[in-house]
Image (cartoon, helix red, strand yellow):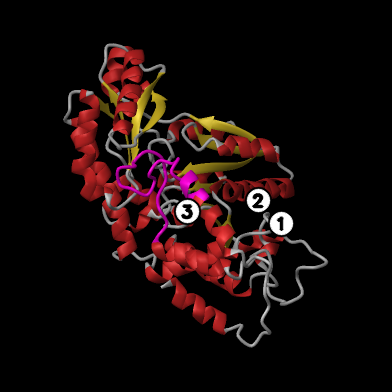
Amino acid sequence: MLQAALARMEDGFAHLPEAVTGMQDSDAMQQVLLAAAGRMHNNYPYFHPLYCGQMLKPPHAVARAAYALAMWVNPNNHALDGGRASSAMEAEAVAAIAQMFGLPQHLGHLTSGGTVANLEALWVAGQLARQAGMPALVLCSEQAHYTHTRISGVLGLACETIVCDGRGRMRLDALEQRLQAAGDSYVTVVVTYGTTAVGAVDPLDAIVQLQLQYGFRIHVDAAYGGYFPLAANLGAEACGAANAIGAADSIVVDPHKHGLQPYGCGCVLFRDPAVGRFYKHDSPYTYFSSAELHLGEITLECSRAGAAAVALWSTQQLLPLAAGGGFAQMLADCRDAALELHARLAADGRFHTMAAPQLDIVCWAVEAGSLEASGARAQQIFEAAAALDLHLALVTLPVRFFPALAARFGQEGTLTCLRSVLMKPEHKQWLPQIWQRLDAACAA
């Protein structure tokens, strides 16, 4: 498959004189690659359905092949000079993501990941605050990704966290109370669609209504959950929030999570293309091949892998971002797997569960006589499961997320829990095996 594509690509350059590079020592390269392959054994099997710990999902075969294909040219999507074809493919791929969110118009591009994408969104918010002559204030939930407070520090923006409810979602009453006290600040509210700890979805639809009253800016961090609006089996609350994403001022999604892409591939979108004025700059050497807008003129990053754009474009050609399609079904299968695992845990007296997962992340605590003992048992099960080739994760969560434990030990404090990210569609079929090994780990 890749060989045929390579041959077709090379045909486009067949008229050039032959040029022999100095990288032809195949025997030496073979030895190095074999050594590298051996070193790669020192990894967990992230690609396998028995790995259901952290947010690690194998890229689709077409994404891997397209990335490798593009690496023969190694385009740089900073400017059209360095990535003519891949820049056009990036624009098309990003437009498809914007259409998925229902944006009528947009300014957007790929980034090296969600952290940089979120940084760009908050940087624009800070520029708008400066333009308005107002102090910038960022508000995010206490379960939002830690990079928002870190990014705010880098950008010199004030940042505060808003308390969550017992399901890990930003509390509307606490948000409104803080908005009432915001004074003359230029406020940006970071709304998370799929928290990284528990997969919680902040009530975006209700926050959009608050925006009408208080006039703040909305940034949606959908780095993890951004593709789930395509799934047909979301609950009512997640659907309501999904339907409101298009009203956000900026959106971040990570194709290298549920978008089946290799690392790193993030995406940032702005609803108002006019914010491109803050990026505008000139360079003495990169902008001469076209009068069109260069991606390098609307990004903070300079050199960016054109291969990432080629991989994403190819994947979206094979699996369009459409409700009811094959890609959407993969997401639905992930949520089905999470709901089934949650149901099994909730019916088992050895465990304590949160509310049903909104996306595909399941967290559970282990029954014990104290919070410390519960955390210790979670650690033991984590290790015993790994010995059985079932790879889970550990997470520290507020006790109030587990009603039965909160009733016994009080609302305050945290405990160590087990966590499973069921982001491979194959997890749905592998649930019986996953449960069998979890049961055996508990017995051990």
Mark 3 or 2, closer to the camera = 3
Q: Identify which residue, 25 or 113, lies in the foreground.
A: 25
Query: Where is residue 373 shown, x and y percent of the image?
Result: 32, 14
Whichever of labels 1 and 3 marks the residue nearer the N terminus, that label is: 3
Is residue 371 visible from the viewing direction of this image? yes
Mark 3 or mark 2, earlier in chain: 2
- Mark seen at residue 124: 2
* 40 horizontally vs 428: left or right: right
Q: State the SS at label 2.
A: helix
Q: Give how far across and how far down residue 377 sits, in percent.
A: 31, 19
Mark 1: which amino acid? Phe
Instruction: Say the numbered circle drawn on residue 256.
Output: 3
Dividing the image into 4 quarters, which one contains the C terminus? top left
- The residue carrying mark 1 is 278
Report the residue that reaches farthest toward the front. 27
The residue carrying pointer 1 sits among few (fewer than 14), some (14 to 19) or many (20 or more) residues within 10 Å by Cα, namely: some
Q: Which kind of residue does numbered mark 2 sit on?
A: Val
Q: Give the range drawn in magenta.
A: 35-60
Whether pointer 2 and pointer 1 mark residues with C-beta atoms closer than 8 Å, the reply is: yes
